[in-house]
Amino acid sequence: MRIGTLIRNMGPQSTPGLLKACAARAETAGLDDLWVVDHIAIPPAESEGSDGRYLDPLATLSFLAGVTSRIGLGVTVLIAPYRAPLPTAKWVASVQELAEGRLQLGLGVGWMAAEFRALGIDRHKRGVLTDELLAFMHECFANDVVSRNGQEFLFRPRPARPPFLLGGAAEHAFARIVRYGDGWMPMKGDPDFLREPVQQLTALMQAAGKPPPRVIPLTGLPLDDLPKAREQLAALAEVGVTGVVHAGRYADESAFAAQVEQLQALR
């Protein structure tokens, strides 16, 4: 199982120096993946813990690609309806190129009404917009010459397409995963909760002639009780989970390093 952690691209921890230092700590320790999150317009009333400061996730991953060489990089999850398809495809391809194939792209439809309002995007169209982005990115990563709005153009660089891991509840996400994705990023790390939906998704992928899904929940592991955390990881693996993203908070580099050491101790 891959073990990853959030690196804070939000709040006071999202400075270049701290991002670089934490990324180096995680890579040196042998952690599998670093993940960032996506928010674009946080209202003042909902800014506790971040003060509304969020670095763009793809820009952050590009920065992390330049200060690391081995560790996997991902976003959990990029809100697809917020972004125009062509610039987003170019961003994703550029990050994948600069990271030399280390990107895992989580994608979701979004939920925060205030952000849709700030962007002037109809929240009720978020599913349609997500499908449009996913279909277009598949086209871009499969062809050197792509057409958009009646104009053909060269899509380069064109590295290997990163895995598309889609977020959302099972009843809404699974059809989209089967059609466009490689796996699921649930927001809950309870093995009993995940057992049945993972079995269902695996069967759906098999019926569609696709490989078994990657399943990587965003969760909080009980790092203050390592035996319990090991039990949780073993139970998650048993139900078909292929990786985890530990969503722990930290104040500074030393606190992040302590979390990384605990995560590595779980192996």
Image: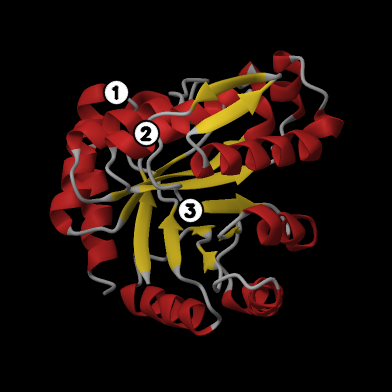
Question: Could you tell me the amino acid type at mark 3?
Answer: Pro
Alpha carbons under labels 3 and 1: distance apart: 28 Å
Helix, strand or loop at label 2? It is helix
Q: Which mark is residue 188?
A: none
Q: Is residue 48 visible?
A: no
Q: Earlier in the sequence, mark 1 or mark 2?
A: 1
Q: Position of residue 128 (x, y in %)?
A: 80, 37
Helix, strand or loop at label 1? It is loop
Q: Is residue 155 visible?
A: yes
Q: Which residue is mark 2?
A: 95
Q: Nearer the viewer, mark 3 or mark 1?
A: 3
Q: Nearer the viewer, mark 1 or mark 2?
A: 2
Residue at 63%, 51% in the rendered image:
167
Alpha carbons under labels 1 and 2: distance apart: 20 Å
Q: Which residue is mark 3?
A: 163
| Viewer-closest of 92 and 6 | 92
Q: Within 10 angstroms of label 1, few (less than 14), some, or many (20 or more) residues? A: some
Q: Which residue is mark 1?
A: 15
Q: Position of residue 54 (x, y in %)?
A: 47, 24
Q: Position of residue 164 (x, y in %)?
A: 54, 51
> Would you say 111 lies left or right of 14 here?
right
Q: Within 10 angstroms of label 3, few (less than 14), some, or many (20 or more) residues? A: some
| Viewer-closest of 181 and 27 | 181
Residue at 35%, 72% in the rendered image:
225
Alpha carbons under labels 3 and 2: distance apart: 13 Å
